[in-house]
Every structure is written in C-alpha cells, then in structure tokens.
Amino acid sequence: MNVLPAVTTAPVCMIGEQLREKINPKSAADLVKEGRSPVRPTIGGGLETAAPLAWPPHPLEHRLVYKNIGRPGWTSDIDCYLRDGGYEQLKQALTLSRDDIVNKVKNSGLRGRGGAGFSCGLKWSFIKPDESDRSI
C-alpha cells in the first residue's frame, strides 16, 4: 500500500514565475503588490497596477490573444487590430454553413471549461438548426 505524504506547502500561489508556498490568504493582496512591476506607477496603491504592462511568454506558452504585446508599433486600438488581420476569421466564418462551422470547432479540439472538458463542437452539434434564437 502506497501512502502519499501530507501536503505541507499549501496554500500555494504563483506570482509571475515565482511559486509562493504556505501563503496566508489574508496577506494575498500584499503578495500581489510585492510583484508590481517597477516600470508601472502605483495609482492609489490599487491592485490594478500590480501586473506588468508587457511580460515575456512562459517557455511553454503559445500566445494567441496576447501575441502582439510588447511588439514595436503595436497599440491596443481597433485600427491596429484590423491592420494585423483582425476579424479575418470572422469574415471566413460568415461564408460557411452551420455544419461547416460545427465541424471546424469539432476538429479544433476546443473543449469547455466546466470541469469535464466536454467537446464544444460535439455540444454544438446537439443543437437543431430550428432551435436557434433568431431574435438576437
């Protein structure tokens, strides 16, 4: 019979790439403030300034949404997004049939975040075309 050792480091959290163990939940806000980037000013000492404006990706991270953060000439406005090909996939999706979209989602491997990781494409395939709400 294998007996696992008792976990003696909980509660645990990560701030940036640093793992913190045996954290007192009452002091969590102070830990986040300690991780504040020196290049960002504090505004009333709030947590909104705790995260750095740009951070390097984790070695195993493949950025999709945040891929342009820190890129020279990149801004967070809609014009920059459109220049970089924003909404091109939406334009393509508008030309596809319902079944084609469901199949693309199935083939993508996209899964839900509800704990079971259920296939989104499979779930979408259960919806009959006549059950959609066209009033939206």
Image: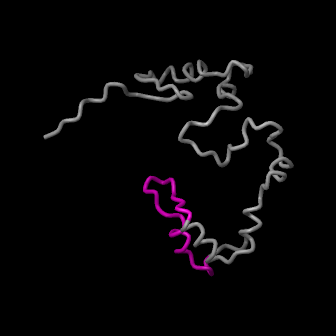
Q: Residue at x 56, y 28 (%)?
A: 16
Q: Is residue 21 magenta?
A: no
Q: Is residue 113 magenta?
A: yes
Q: How many marks?
A: 0
When the figure is inspected, residue 121 is found, relative to residue 29, above or below; the finding is below
Image location (x, y in percent) of residue 54: 70, 32
| Residue range of the region highlighted in magenta in the rendering | 108-131
For residue 11, side relative to residue 75 (left or right): left
Image location (x, y in percent) of residue 127: 56, 75
Q: Nearer the viewer, residue 94 or 48?
A: 94
Q: Residue at x 83, y 44 (%)?
A: 77
Q: Identify the image quadrant of the C terminus.
A: bottom right
Q: Which of the 4 image quadrants contains residue 116?
A: bottom left
Residue with the most extreme bottom position: 130
Q: Nearer the viewer, residue 13 or 45?
A: 13
When the figure is inspected, residue 108 is found, relative to residue 22, above or below; the finding is below
Q: Nearer the viewer, residue 95 or 8?
A: 95
Image location (x, y in percent) of residue 97: 68, 78
Q: Identify the image quadrant of the N terminus.
A: top left
Q: Residue at x 76, y 38 (%)?
A: 71
Tell me the colour scheme of the image.
one colour
For residue 80, side relative to residue 10 (left or right): right
Q: Which of the 4 image quadrants contains residue 55?
A: top right
Image location (x, y in percent) of residue 14: 50, 29
Q: Residue at x 55, y 37 (%)?
A: 59
